[in-house]
Image (cartoon, rainbow, N blue to C red):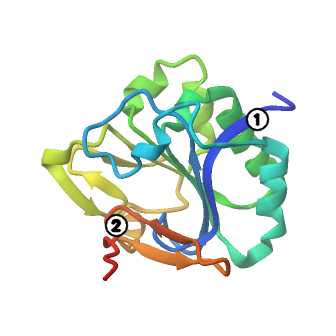
């Protein structure tokens, strides 16, 4: 798995709306599930606007953040459409840091368990948020976009109440004026 590369849609070094505490957040590029009403449709095209980054370089970014973050959250797109790179990332984070790991997937935990590298991946995670987004069951709280999605605490690091307490949204304005909206229920920006 050395030398794996991840197609990255976006990277946010500090977020409070993607899990407990301050976390780095990564959105991968590519999702064939295409859930109607998805908040991130720009991440669906596997060949879309993506930075292809070496997993080791991404972990170097996380290590450089030091103790300013407590974890990494991986979302998308669909992270499990890049299984080798995702597994390499989670293993490297475990080997080189004490960060917690949260992954969002449109696949259910049972579907993941049936995937060739699914069980190995689940062993690396602290929390999995699973299930396809269903617009008619909008929930937008506690890291769940819709009511059918489930929170799986796979280690003792977090309880479901910790996940439920995550803020619903946030807005970041970069020094270059770039605006990043994140979370399960971010407010729309209206320009006048």
Give residue 121's position: percent from left, percent from top: 60, 34
- Residue lying farthest to the front in this orientation: 192
State the quadrant of the C terminus: bottom left
Q: Residue at 75% of width from left, 50% of height from top?
A: 93
The answer to whether 190 is drawn above or below residue 142 in the figure is below
Give residue 34's position: percent from left, percent from top: 35, 33
Q: Residue at 67% of width from left, 81% of height from top?
A: 175
Secondary element at image label 2: helix
Q: Which mark is residue 164?
A: 2
Give residue 94's position: percent from left, percent from top: 74, 49
Q: How crowded is mark 2: few (under 14 residues within 10 Å), some or many (20 or more)?
A: some
The answer to whether 146 is drawn above or below residue 167 in the figure is above
Closer-to-camera residue (58/100): 58
Secondary element at image label 1: strand
Count of picture labels:
2
Task: Determine which residue is flagged by label 1.
Answer: 5
User: Dots 2 and 1: beta carbons under 8 Å?
Assistant: no
State the quadrant of the N terminus: top right
Q: Which of pointers 2 and 1 lies earlier in the amino acid sequence?
A: 1
Choose mark 2 or mark 1, whichever is in front: 1
> Quadrant of the rendered structure where residue 84 is?
top right
Q: Distance between the residues labelled 2 and 1?
A: 32 Å
The answer to whether 61 is drawn above or below residue 113 in the figure is below
Q: Residue at 22% of width from left, 42% of height from top?
A: 134
């Amino acid at each position: 798995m050395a030398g794996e590369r991840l197609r990255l849609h976006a990277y946010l070094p500090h977020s409070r709306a993607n899990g407990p505490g301050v976390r780095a957040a990564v959105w991968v590029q590519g999702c064939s599930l295409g859930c109607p009403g998805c908040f991130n449709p720009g991440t669906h095209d596997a060949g879309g606007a993506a930075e292809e980054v070496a997993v080791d370089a991404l972990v170097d970014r996380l290590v450089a953040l030091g103790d300013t973050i407590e974890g990494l959250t991986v979302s998308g797109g669909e992270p499990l459409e890049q299984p080798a790179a995702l597994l390499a990332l989670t293993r490297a984070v475990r080997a080189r840091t004490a960060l917690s790991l949260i992954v969002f997937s449109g696949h259910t935990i049972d579907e993941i368990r049936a995937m060739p590298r699914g069980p190995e991946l689940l062993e690396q995670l602290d929390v999995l948020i699973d299930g396809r987004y269903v617009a008619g069951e909008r929930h937008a709280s506690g890291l769940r976009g819709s009511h059918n999605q489930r929170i799986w605490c796979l280690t003792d690091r977090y309880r479901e109440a910790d996940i439920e307490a995550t803020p619903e949204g946030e807005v970041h304005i970069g020094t270059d004026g770039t605006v990043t909206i994140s979370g399960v229920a971010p407010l729309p920006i209206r320009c006048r």
